[in-house]
Image (cartoon, helix red, strand yellow):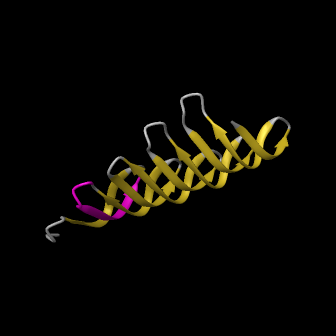
């Protein structure tokens, strides 16, 4: 399934949906064949990212759900970077700063039993 509001020089451009050969689906705003603006990627596994893109990479604010783990926060160059919250399937959560995909800087870890 390939559906776009507008085609620019045969590259995905405008608002649309793209179904990947591996069963994943990318949907949102496209520029020069890449997600740019608001969009989502759903993998065949059920993992989902919904949020902002720039040049095909996660950039800005977004939510990623992988199984029973969820990250909500800021992204730069396709990596968790800035402020965000990671919630684990156990109910434990880390809220704080991230840099290049790693917990870095100030933050707090709270266990489901309330111990920080």
Q: Is residue 41 magenta?
A: no
Query: Is 33 left or right of 94, judged from the image as shown?
Result: right
The extreme right residue here reads 9
Q: Looking at the picture, tell me which residue is in the foreground, 92 or 25.
A: 25
Residue found at x 49% / y 39% = 43
Residue found at x 66% / y 39% = 18
Residue 38 placed where, x, y %?
63, 57
Which image quadrant for residue 2? top right
Residue 9 placed where, x, y %?
86, 37
The rendered magenta stretch, by its main secondary structure, is classed as: strand
Residue found at x 23% / y 61% = 92
Judge whether 99 appears above or below 32 on screen.
below
Segment colored magenta: 89-99
Q: Is residue 57 visible?
A: yes
Quarter of the image with the N terminus is top right
Judge whether 38 appears above or below 2 on screen.
below
The extreme top residue here reads 21
């Amino acid at each position: 399934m390939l559906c776009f509001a507008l085609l620019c020089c045969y590259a995905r451009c405008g608002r649309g949906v793209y179904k990947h050969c591996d069963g994943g689906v990318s949907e949102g705003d496209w520029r020069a064949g890449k997600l740019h603006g608001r969009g989502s990627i759903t993998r065949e596994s059920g993992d989902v990212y919904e949020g902002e893109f720039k040049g095909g990479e996660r950039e800005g604010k977004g939510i990623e759900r992988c199984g029973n783990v969820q990250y909500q926060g800021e992204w730069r160059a396709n990596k968790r970077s800035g402020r965000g919250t990671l919630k684990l399937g156990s109910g434990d959560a880390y809220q704080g700063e991230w840099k290049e995909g790693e917990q870095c800087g100030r933050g707090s870890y709270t266990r489901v039993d309330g111990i920080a």
